[in-house]
Image: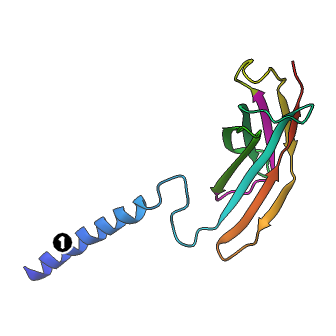
Amino acid sequence: MKIHFNKIISYLLTGILGILGFSSCVGDEPDEYGTPTVDYVYKGKVTDEKDVPIQGIQVAADLKDPNDASIKKDTIYTDANGEFQKKITGLYTVKSATIKFSDVDGKQNGSFQDATITTEDLVKTKKRNGWYLGEFTLTANQKLKKK
């Protein structure tokens, strides 16, 4: 009877630990110790042709892997100084980025033409340390023309 009870306890504990182990792997961010991660920062400033900062410009970044497949899309907006910055942590390798600048606030800050840039100018800004593969920064400054 004691042997039968120990087997049941052993099976239950194995099942519970298995469920807990798998649930720790669910999510968008790396949770498990020993998972290599890398940070990507895209930032810049949007101005008009007279170098006046433009607030409220939509900045849509499409990060691509070495096979030109889209791996992360994100949208942010410029602040009062016309600046934007976003940090993304992931498990992927970014080779290039396509960044689209759109005036979505109408005539509130003036009307500007959309612009799109594609770049591979990623600069390593933090060194590798163990499983952390470092930080790479992409700076995209853009002048927009009035409509």
Comparing 72 with 9, the one in front is 72
Which quadrant is the C terminus positioned in?
A: top right
Q: Regarding mark 1 in the picture, which secondary structure is present there?
A: helix
Identify the amino acid type marked 1: Ile
Which quadrant is the N terminus positioned in?
A: bottom left
Residue 141 picture quarter: top right
Q: Position of residue 42 (x, y in %)?
A: 75, 49
Query: What secondary structure predominates along the stretch shown in magenta?
Result: strand
**Magenta-drawn segment:** 90-102
Residue most extreme to the right: 50
Q: Is residue 109 magenta?
A: no
Looking at the image, residue 32 sits to the left or right of residue 4; the answer is right
Looking at the image, residue 67 sits to the left or right of residue 12; the answer is right
Residue most extreme to the bottom: 2
The residue depicted at 72 percent of the width and 67 percent of the height is 134
Comparing 145 with 88, the one in front is 145
The residue depicted at 51 percent of the width and 63 percent of the height is 31
Q: Is residue 11 above or below residue 117?
A: below
Q: Is residue 97 magenta?
A: yes
According to the picture, the residue beneath numbered tag 1 turns out to be: 8
Q: Position of residue 72 (x, y in %)?
A: 67, 45
The residue depicted at 76 percent of the width and 28 percent of the height is 102
Q: Is residue 59 above or below residue 33?
A: above
Looking at the image, residue 82 sits to the left or right of residue 145; the answer is left
Comparing 1 with 34, the one in front is 34
* Crowding at mark 1 (Cα within 10 Å: few <14, some 14-19, many 20+): few
Q: Position of residue 13 (x, y in %)?
A: 26, 71
